[in-house]
Amino acid sequence: MSEDEAIDARLGALLRGAERSPDETFVSRVERALAAERRMEAQRRAAWRRFAGEAAASVAVAAAFVLLGRTGPVPDELELIASSPLPAAGLLLILWMVVAFRPATAR
């Protein structure tokens, strides 16, 4: 055995270290973290689907209010504010969106 091979063998023996059994606590922590990440991803997808549905419903309601507002005769500005149901409907829509889009932690 040459001197280089002897040094390589000695370094290999020193760096190899002792055989160890798997760390069960580390493995269980990683498995729990992966399971939590899968649950969070599923909840995230569900939240985006719910948001998309509520946003589509809001757009449909707003479009209906706009179309209903345009079907009647065109009132002057004071008459629009005082007697038209359109501002009340818009306020109702805004209040509905505030209640519907509350943070998920409140549910």
Image (spheres, rainbow, N blue to C red):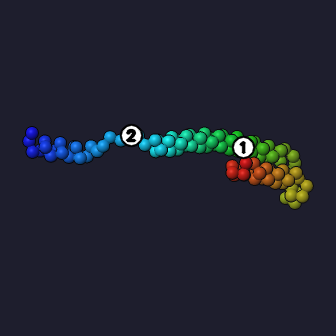
Q: Which amino acid does label 2 sit on?
A: Ser
Q: Is residue 66 left or right of residue 56?
A: right
- Can residue 90 be seen from the camera position used here? no
How many marks can you see?
A: 2
Residue 81 sits above or below residue 15 on the image: below
Residue 56 sits above or below residue 96 on the image: above
Quadrant containing the N terminus in the rendered view = top left
**Residue located at (72% from left, 43% from top):** 54
Q: Position of residue 79 (x, y in %)?
A: 89, 57
Q: Is residue 89 left or right of residue 18?
A: right
Query: Residue extending furthest bottom?
Result: 78
Q: Where is residue 47 in the image (x, y as percent from the top left)?
A: 65, 43
Q: Is residue 59 left or right of residue 89?
A: left
Q: Mark 2 points at which residue?
A: 21
> Is disc 1 in contact with disc 2, using a CB cutoff of under 8 Å?
no
> What SS does tag 2 mark?
loop
**Residue located at (75% from left, 48% from top):** 100
> In front: 66, or 89?
89
Foreground: disc 1 or disc 2: 2
Q: Where is residue 84 in the image (x, y as percent from the top left)?
A: 88, 53
Q: Name the residue under label 1.
A: 54
Q: Mark 1 vs mark 2: which is more N-terminal?
A: 2
